[in-house]
Image (tube, grey):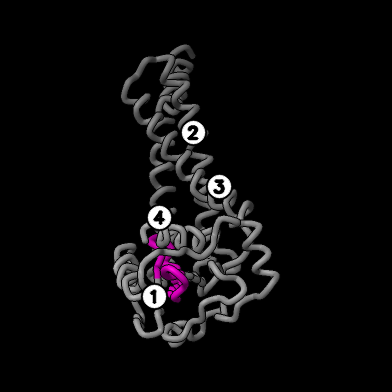
Amino acid sequence: MGGSSAKSEGSKQGILGGLPLYGFGLAVLAVLVMMLAGLGSRWEWWHFRVGFTILKWCAYGGLAAGLISLTGLLMVAKRRYPPGLLLGGVGLVVSLLVVWVPWSWLQTARTVPPIHDITTDTENPPQFGAVLPLRKGAPNTIEYGGPEVAAQQRSGYPDLGPATLAVSPETVFERALLTAREVGWEIVDANSTEGRIEATDTTFWFGFKDDIVVRITPVEGGSRIDVRSLSRVGKSDVGTNAKRIRKFLQRL
């Protein structure tokens, strides 16, 4: 009886002592599947909404991995077992990362307006032309949403507006074209006569394609630059288009 009890207790301790390894393994699996959720959408293995669903379940997996890793850490801490402490710690950090990514997206989506068309000129937005064939079949049209969308943008991104530089439109055009290439945009059309640049930017993870048009017009003492960034899919861009415009104008 005593031997059987000791064997049972030893088996229980072995399972509990292995929790850091189980938590670490589950956390690594969750992060790999999380990466695949976006890349699979980019590679057109599945619809991006399927990728979002996979991402949600990865968050649940991350929570489970975090709980297992934390429990394992508490168990091995009593034994002062360095390998278990290392596995448990790494598993906990990785699991928190898996949970944080979709959580941060959700928090951002709640704080920005649910729009996908951002422009520095809401009264007379720059118009698309050359990218139209590339947007064939895209759920989001190029028609601007009007005063309602403009009001949402002003509320969510009050800092966005046109930029003015005290240099000629020709100089600004060359500088804008160079900047567009530096930030990784795929140039679709560059018309120096009209002062217009059209391009497409593809997000790294999910491979979302957003189209951009830059309009340069002469003003007294220099040039005015307006930018419009429009997503092809999705009701909300989770702030991506506004960030893109800010980055471009800051570098310009």
- Are discs 2 and 4 less than 8 Å apart at CB? no
Q: Is residue 237 left or right of residue 181?
A: right
Quadrant in the picture for the C terminus: bottom left
Work out which residue is located at the far top of the displayed protein and give it: 2
Residue labelled with disc 1: 199
Q: Earlier in the sequence, mark 2 or mark 4?
A: 4
- The Cα atoms of the two marked residues, 3 and 4, are separated by 15 Å
- The Cα atoms of the two marked residues, 2 and 3, are separated by 20 Å
Residue labelled with disc 4: 35
Q: Earlier in the sequence, mark 3 or mark 4?
A: 4
Residue labelled with disc 3: 103
Residue 211: x and y in percent read 45, 74
Label 2: state its secondary structure: helix
In magenta, the rendered stretch is 201-224
Residue 214, placed above or below residue 15: below
Label 1: state its secondary structure: strand
Q: Earlier in the sequence, mark 2 or mark 3?
A: 2
